[in-house]
Each structure stands twice: as structure tokens, then as C-alpha cells.
């Protein structure tokens, strides 16, 4: 960290700010106004008696008092002063932790404010034994950078470097990461580099952080390729390295990279990947970059050696779209472009469904082929925060289909999915500026009009919307929630036990679909000799199936069985299917 407030070994604090838009800059500390010296586009000053825990602000051109753009902590919110933080004061206990291989990640996405009644980083620690018992290997935190108020998804963050004060600030986040690592769990952090939230966003006062050359759906685009962009690129890359180094974060999930615009010779994501992976190697840790991308562009996850951007993996939205569309038969929005078992087959064996073919929703050809990319590079899910809140008005898939159909779809987790939680997950905010709050409410109504009627709409600014979204852990004592939780535990345990279920080898995966009978048959194998056969019956009536009808198994002894309506059978074997080692329904 070369910018912000840095404690020096010999005592005192070095304040350094990139502010090319500013004529004069001063630090306000303990009632004093201390002028800073200009050096090129930077301002800096050494304050010999400054101490950790002191609040400070920056005075721009003698008339604007602002937080530090690289503030480590905003104890009084986005409009208040920054606080000097000693990054070395926390005693870590995870020195033996080196991270996990990418193909061992079983992700559990959660929102800090609604995962527990307390809504704190420290409260999540109490749930670590539950998560370990469930079998997941990583938690993924929705964005935690300081945002206005105390209720927000986090994508309105404005202080990139400051863990949210309402969640417990820097020490609270470090305690959570430390506890996760000591329990063998990786921590993924969702970061937003495509825009900055509207309230408390003072970056433009300091420098050319934004550009009018491009627009995002969420506000001004970040300036990654225009005049003055070198400082913006450094600001973002430093932030990624900061989470990796100072907070021991294992992976970053980069929000909506299709809203990151850079037409320079070296794309910002490629530069970020180079620096991030080099830093992880220097630290002796395995760390990863996971992109959320609506581009279906294979360059995102191709290696830097062949001209790709070097992301290690990406969220695979089309997996969700194909499976959920098939189960719910939606007739609205982008989901109308999916909904056949052929799509399910393609998304599991190749990756992108739209890989250069015509998209009815986009009304053009879209995407590139990902069939040659390894399966470990695709993060699949049947639910996430966006899909629950945006396309279903807070309703989870388990509330849209029968429990038996939901079991068919069970793959990966957003908090509560593992026990078919009855609580919704809605979009919520707590903007302090009343006019902005009204604008967000009205904008939300228009943006998702295809998915919600006026009667179904929940006002994001209402505290009731936030409270309804909190997980209700008491239902774990009831059916069908206990039953679904047990299913998830069994499925995760099987994945960890059987190499054929965890090798991410698309080339060792074979799928047959019968659109008429509504049956999917998938065989997965492994070089070590283990095999799995999964048969899913999506029909409303029972089906008789013969496992020897699968092409790869034609030499095996015929085994017939009845698969109940909207259910599945999983057959596992150490060698072949002449002797079934396990049969889980």
C-alpha cells in the first residue's frame, strides 16, 4: 500500500493521495489542517505524531472535505472521516494455510447482513461448524466495501478499501478469514470494479476516475483507457492485491466484467491477472480470479500465454438459465432463450450454450465456443443473489417448483438453498439521500418490469424488505428442510469421495437426453476407474430405465429399475456397473 495512510516503522504516518484534479490538498487531523506537498500527480506528507485509531479527512482546494480514496476504514460511514489503521496489529493464526486447488472449491455464497440475525462478520464464525458439516470448501462474501447506510447488497460500495463498518470493519473481516482458514475453508470476496455507487462517491473530485466514453447500467464507467487512466488502473489493481495480501483472501469474484471497458493494448483484467497471480506466487499461496461475465467470450478465461485475459474461472450463468428454464417454463426476459434438455446437455458437456449461434433474446449471433476449456473454469449454480431477487422477486427455486423437482436441480449453493429456505432474498438499500432512494426504487421497478408486477414489488429502501431477507435458521428442525439439507450433505460427500464426480473432466462426461420422455442420462468416469451414472426423470410419471442402454455401458449386465416421477438415481462403481456399489435416490 503506497497510497492512503501508511504507518512507518520509525513512527508516524505517511499520507499519500493521487489527486491530479486538485490544486491544493491538506490533511485534517485532531483539529489541525496540515498542508500536503505536491509531487507530480500525488500529494504527500509525513505526520510524525499521527497514530492508529485517529480519524482524519482530506481538504481539497480549501473548500471540500472528503474521506481518503484509499481509506482502510470509514467508522462513521461514506460521508464521514477516514481512520488510520495499523494493518499489522491483527495476529494471524493461519500461517499453515496455502489455499485450495480451484477444482476443490465448493462455494457457498452469502450476504453478511442477512446470513445471521446479528448481520456481522463475527456472527458468521459461529456458523463455520455448520458449513463444515455441510461439506462446502469455500464461502463467497457478497461485496463488503463501505456503502451508504447499513442495508445494501454491496454493489453500491464507494470506499473500495474499507470493510463495511456495520459488518464489523477491518478486524471483524480479518477474524472471519482467520477462522475460516483455521477450519479449512477458503474465502472468496466479491469485488466491484465496473462502477462506484452513487452516494458518497467522491473519487471524481480527486482525479479522472470516470469516463463519458462508455456507460454502464449502474452509473459512470471507470476510466481504464482514457487520459489519466494510469492512476485509475493502479487504484483497482492495488485493491485486488490489498485483499490478497492484507486480508489473506483466497479468491476474488469480479462483478459484471462486461461493464469494464478497456480498448488499450493491455486490458485492465489481463494486467490485474498478471499482478495478482505474481503476488500470490510470491506469498506461496494458491489464489484465484473468478469473473462474472455476460460476454460468452472464451478470451476471458483463456491463459495470458495465448492472448487471453487470464481469469481462472467464470460464473456460468447459462447453467442456471438452462436448468431453471426447463423446470419452470418461463415466458419472460432472457430466460425465454433457454428451456430444452438439449441446452442442458450442451451446457454440461461444452460450456456456453450460445457459442456463436443466434440468440432470440439478443436478436443476433452471440458468444464463442468454450468446449475446449476445462470444466474447472466454470462456476455452476442453480441460484445466486441476482437470479433469486431479480427474476423471481425474492422467491427461491424451491418455492417455484416441487421439492422433488428442486432435488433434481441441486448443484451449488446460495445461502439457505441447502435446506430449501422459505425466506426470500430481495434487493435492499438504505440510501441516506432521500431523492436517491426514491430514484433507486423507481429505477428498480422499470428495470425488472418483465419479472414483477406492481403487487409483487418490494421497495428496496424499506427496512421490512431487508428483514424479510434474513435467513430463518429455526426451520432446520422441520420437514422438508431437514430432508433437503441431508440430501446436500450426501451429494457433497459423494463428490469428495468419488473422483469421477470431482475431476471436472468434460471429456470424460457423456450425456444423453430424451426430450419426449424428459429423461437425462449422464455418465462420468475417471482415469482411476471409477464411474458414475446419473439418471434424472423430469417427467410427471414414473419411467423404467435400463442402465445397459447407455452407449458406454452396453457390455454391462442389464439392470432395470423404475425411476419415480421427478426424481433421480445415482449409480456408482469402482470399475463398471456389473456390481453396483451404491444406489442413492
Image (cartoon, rainbow, N blue to C red):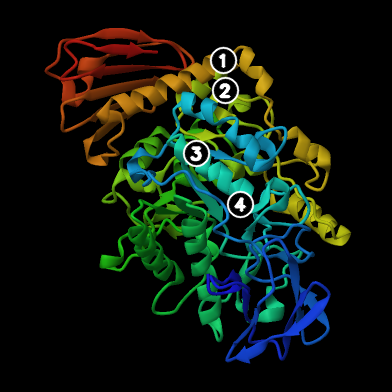
Residue extending furthest toward the right? 434
Q: Badges 2 and 3: C-beta atoms under 8 Å apart?
A: no
Q: Which residue is mark 2?
A: 419
Provide the secondary structure element on which disc 2 rests.
helix
Q: Is residue 393 visible?
A: no
Q: Position of residue 419 (x, y in %)?
A: 57, 23
Q: Which residue is mark 3?
A: 180
Q: Which tag, 1 or 2, sits closer to the chain's start? A: 2
Residue extending furthest toward the left? 555
Q: Position of residue 146 (x, y in %)?
A: 69, 57
Marks 3 and 4, how far apart in space? 18 Å
Q: Which residue is mark 4?
A: 143
Q: Residue at the location (44% across, 27% down)?
A: 135
Q: Where is residue 397, by image quadrant?
A: top right
Marks 3 and 1, how far apart in space? 25 Å
Q: Position of residue 256 (x, y in %)?
A: 54, 57
Q: Which residue is mark 1?
A: 482
Provide the secondary structure element on which disc 4 rests.
loop
Marks 1 and 4, how far apart in space? 30 Å
Q: Is residue 191 visible?
A: yes
Q: Which tag, 2 or 4, sits closer to the chain's start? A: 4
Amino acid at each position: 500500500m503506497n497510497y492512503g495512510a501508511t504507518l512507518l516503522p520509525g513512527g508516524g504516518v505517511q499520507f499519500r493521495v493521487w489527486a491530479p484534479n486538485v490544486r491544493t490538498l491538506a490533511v485534517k487531523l485532531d483539529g489541525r489542517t496540515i498542508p500536503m506537498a505536491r509531487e507530480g500527480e500525488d500529494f504527500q506528507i509525513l505526520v510524525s505524531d499521527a497514530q492508529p485509531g485517529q480519524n482524519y479527512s482530506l481538504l481539497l482546494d480549501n473548500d471540500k472535505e472528503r474521506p481518503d480514496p484509499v481509506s482502510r476504514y470509514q467508522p462513521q460511514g461514506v460521508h464521514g472521516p477516514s481512520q488510520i489503521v495499523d494493518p499489522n496489529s491483527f495476529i494471524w493464526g493461519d500461517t499453515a494455510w496455502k489455499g485450495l486447488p480451484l477444482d476443490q472449491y465448493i462455494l457457498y455464497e452469502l450476504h453478511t447482513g442477512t446470513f445471521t440475525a446479528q448481520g456481522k462478520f463475527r456472527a458468521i464464525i459461529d456458523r463455520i461448524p455448520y458449513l463444515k458439516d455441510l461439506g462446502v470448501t469455500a464461502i463467497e462474501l457478497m461485496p463488503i466495501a463501505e456503502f451508504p447506510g447499513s442495508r445494501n447488497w454491496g454493489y453500491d460500495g464507494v470506499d473500495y478499501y474499507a470493510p463495511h463498518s456495520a459488518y464489523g470493519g477491518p478486524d471483524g473481516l480479518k477474524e472471519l478469514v482467520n477462522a475460516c482458514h483455521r477450519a479449512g475453508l477458503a474465502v472468496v470476496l466479491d469485488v466491484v470494479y465496473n462502477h462506484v455507487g452513487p452516494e458518497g462517491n467522491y473519487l471524481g473530485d480527486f482525479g479522472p476516475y470516470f469516463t463519458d466514453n462508455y456507460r454502464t447500467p449502474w452509473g459512470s464507467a471507470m476510466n481504464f483507457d482514457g487520459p489519466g487512466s494510469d492512476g485509475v488502473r493502479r487504484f483497482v489493481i492495488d485493491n485486488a492485491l490489498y485483499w490478497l495480501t492484507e486480508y489473506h483472501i483466497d479468491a476474488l469474484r469480479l462483478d459484471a466484467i462486461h461493464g469494464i471497458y478497456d480498448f488499450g493494448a493491455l486490458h485492465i483484467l489481463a494486467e490485474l491477472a498478471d499482478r495478482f497471480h505474481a503476488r500470490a506466487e510470491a506469498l506461496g499461496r494458491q489464489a484465484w480470479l473468478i469473473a462474472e461475465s455476460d460476454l460468452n467470450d472464451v478470451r476471458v478465461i483463456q491463459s495470458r500465454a495465448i492472448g487471453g485475459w487470464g481469469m481462472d474461472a467464470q460464473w456460468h450463468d447459462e447453467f442456471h438459465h438452462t436448468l431453471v428454464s426447463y423446470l419452470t417454463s418461463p415466458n419472460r426476459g432472457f430466460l425465454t432463450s433457454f428451456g430444452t434438455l438439449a441446452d442442458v446437455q450442451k451446457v454440461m458437456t461444452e460450456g456456453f450454450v450460445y457459442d456463436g449461434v443466434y440468440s432470440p433474446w439478443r436478436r443476433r449471433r452471440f458468444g464463442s465456443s468454450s468446449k475446449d476449456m476445462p470444466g474447472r473454469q466454470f462456476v455452476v449454480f442453480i441460484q445466486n443473489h441476482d437470479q433469486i431477487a431479480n427474476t423471481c422477486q425474492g422467491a427461491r427455486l424451491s418455492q417455484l417448483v416441487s421439492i422433488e423437482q428442486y432435488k433434481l436441480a441441486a448443484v451449488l449453493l446460495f445461502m439457505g438453498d441447502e435446506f430449501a429456505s422459505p425466506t426470500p432474498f430481495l434487493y435492499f438499500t438504505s440510501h441516506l439521500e432521500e431523492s436517491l432512494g426514491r430514484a433507486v426504487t423507481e429505477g428498480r421497478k422499470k428495470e425488472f418490469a418483465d419479472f414483477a408486477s406492481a403487487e409483487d414489488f418490494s421497495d428496496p429502501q424499506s427496512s421490512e424488505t431487508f428483514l424479510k431477507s434474513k435467513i430463518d435458521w429455526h426451520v432446520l428442525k422441520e420437514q422438508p428442510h431437514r430432508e433437503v439439507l441431508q440430501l446436500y450433505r450426501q451429494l457433497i460427500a459423494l463428490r469428495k469421495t468419488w473422483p469421477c464426480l470431482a475431476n471436472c473432466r468434460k471429456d470424460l462426461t457423456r450425456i444423453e437426453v430424451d426430450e419426449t420422455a424428459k429423461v437425462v442420462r449422464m455418465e462420468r468416469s475417471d482415469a482411476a476407474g471409477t464411474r458414475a451414472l446419473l439418471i434424472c426423470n423430469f417427467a410427471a410419471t414414473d419411467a423404467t430405465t435400463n442402465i445397459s442402454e447407455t452407449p458406454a455401458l452396453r457390455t454391462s449386465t442389464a439392470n432395470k429399475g423404475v425411476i419415480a416421477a421427478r426424481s433421480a438415481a445415482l449409480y456408482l462403481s469402482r470399475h463398471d456397473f456389473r456390481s453396483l456399489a451404491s444406489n442413492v435416490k
